[in-house]
Amino acid sequence: MSDAFARYPSLKDRVVLITGGASGIGASMVEHFAAQGSRVAFLDFDDRAGPEVAGRTGASFVHCDLRDIPALRAAIAQVKAQLGPVSVLVNNAARDDRHGWETVEPDYWDERFQSNLRHAFFCTQAVAPMMQERRQGSIIFFGSVSWMMSQGGMPAYTAAKSAAHGLARGLARDLGPQGIRCNVVVPGWIFTERQEQLWATPEAVAKHLERQCLKEKLYAPDIARMVLWLAADDSRMVTAQSFVVDGGGI
């Protein structure tokens, strides 16, 4: 990690669990927490990229399909047994596959919510008791600027991502008396490898940057550094809030 950016002593040796940590923003967060001296575990079903990220960072990779709730609960129990009680949970995993409203069937709608929202609740449900025992914890959800910008072409995704805000705010009220904080990070268009390959045409990028106040592309570390602050004790009185990191695009 560059010396140009902050270090957080409160994150050293803290157990951090990240969902979807094998690629993109998730992998960057694994790297950043590991560089802070945290004990990091991440859940993902990518058996190719997961071990590579683990080997590079020293984090623990646990294979898990987050749509399978019994498997998810077992994976979190495994993390606790290996590293200890989780102090920071980052509900990052998501899939922003495009889909037209005309063709969506109930099974597809349900699967999109399983991939983009449901696991965040059940991860929180499994981890919160560990935090309650210590009367301290930070749970970070991920939203998206897509629904704030009235972006079309993926209604199940935008519905799930908007719901993450309501979930986080309600849980902040429920868990706050035990010292547990719940916040939302809202990324703009982050130029991960997936985004570059699938959707970042020169025309689309130029149009997007024209809308931003800051005329630069955003990358995964820009999000990871916001997450570090929300996980650390520096933000100890911050909860039920949403933090947009989009270069001033909305």
Image: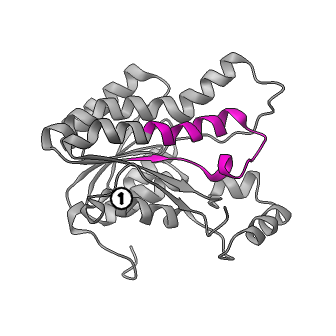
Instruction: Based on the picture, tell me whether residue 180 belongs to the magenta stretch.
Output: no
Q: Which residue is mark 1?
A: 230
**What's the amino acid at mark 1?**
Leu
Whether residue 131 is visible, yes or no, is yes
Q: In the current view of this chain or complex, which residue is farthest to the top?
A: 106
Q: Is residue 204 above or below residue 213?
A: above
Looking at the rendering, the stretch of residues picked out in magenta corresponds to 140-167
Whether residue 43 is visible, yes or no, is no
Q: Is residue 61 left or right of residue 149?
A: left
Q: How many marks?
A: 1
Quadrant in which the C terminus appears = bottom right
Identify the residue shown where x is 33% and y is 30%. 125
Along the viewing direction, whichever of 128 and 193 lies nearer the viewer: 128
Callout 1 secondary element: helix
Q: Tell me which secondary structure the magenta stretch mostly adopts.
A: helix
Along the viewing direction, whichever of 229 and 166 lies nearer the viewer: 166
Q: Is residue 28 above or below residue 95?
A: below
Q: Position of residue 21 (x, y in %)?
A: 45, 47
Identify the residue shown where x is 58% and y is 65%. 219
The image quadrant of residue 95 is: top right
Q: Coloring scheme of the render?
A: one colour
Identify the residue shown where x is 50% and y is 61%. 223
Q: Position of residue 231 (x, y in %)?
A: 32, 57
Quadrant in which the N terminus appears = bottom left
Along the viewing direction, whichever of 150 and 84 lies nearer the viewer: 150
**Crowdedness near tag 1: few (<14), some (14–19) or many (≥20) residues, C-alpha within 10 Å:** many
Q: Position of residue 72 (x, y in %)?
A: 39, 28
Q: Position of residue 229 (x, y in %)?
A: 35, 64
Q: In the current view of this chain or complex, which residue is farthest to the bottom?
A: 4
